[in-house]
Image (cartoon, rainbow, N blue to C red):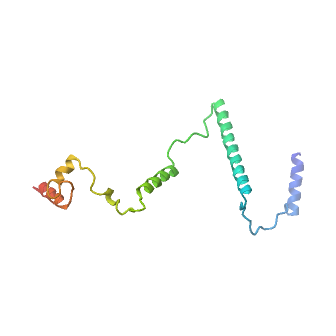
Amino acid sequence: MSGYVRAVNFVKNLVKGGSKTSPTINKVKPTVNTTELEKKISEATKAVQKAKGSGAKLKQSIFELKNNMPITFKGNKTKTLSNTTKKRNEESKKMFDKTKGRIERKFGGGADKQLSSKQMKIASLAGNKKKIDGPDFKKLKEMKKA
């Protein structure tokens, strides 16, 4: 079609009031898969679309490599938020014992930890030699003041 014909048609549409519009849409029914067949068809359709997208990315990358252009779709090896939260949630699930809960695990799990040589020196100042407690800190403060 020539530019002249398009211009004439454009003016005719303006004079008529434009193209016809559809009636207002009040609501849209959601698609709910009720049968197993519908669910499988939906999953297959999603898989096909995902494969098409991956194929398009591959074609684009091949084109860019052949023409020495910068690559658009680079691989992402960095940690994402979903990776870190998933790992953190797994660790906290391991830590949470249904019989004991988190109450006993507060403050690092108790006094059954081994003390370093420096900590043993502090613990031997006063009281229990296998645990650092309040009297040890008082003695340490007194030694620093003197």
Q: Is residue 19 left or right of residue 76?
A: right
Taking the spot 55% from the left edge, 42% from the top edge, the residue there is 76
Q: Quadrant of residue 130?
A: bottom left
Res. 67 in view = no
Q: Residue furthest bottom?
A: 26
Residue 36, how many percent across, how many down?
Answer: 71, 57
Taking the spot 36% from the left edge, 63% from the top edge, the residue there is 103
| Of residues 25 and 108, the one drawn nearer to the viewer in this rendering | 108
| Of residues 63 and 102, the one drawn nearer to the viewer in this rendering | 102
Q: Residue furthest left?
A: 146
Residue 59, how many percent across, how many down?
Answer: 68, 37
Taking the spot 12% from the left edge, 55% from the top edge, the residue there is 143
Taking the spot 27% from the left edge, 56% from the top edge, the residue there is 111
Res. 60 in view = yes
Residue 17, how many percent across, how many down?
Answer: 85, 63
Say how many tags the image has: 0
Q: Quadrant of residue 24?
A: bottom right
| Of residues 118 and 34, the one drawn nearer to the viewer in this rendering | 34
Split into 4 quadrants, where in the image is the C terminus? bottom left
Residue 1, how many percent across, how many down?
Answer: 89, 46
Query: Compared with residue 24, is residue 8 higher up or lower down, i.e. above or below?
Result: above
Q: Is residue 41 left or right of residue 124?
A: right
| Of residues 101 and 82, the one drawn nearer to the viewer in this rendering | 101
Query: Compared with residue 19, is residue 26 higher up or lower down, i.e. above or below?
Result: below
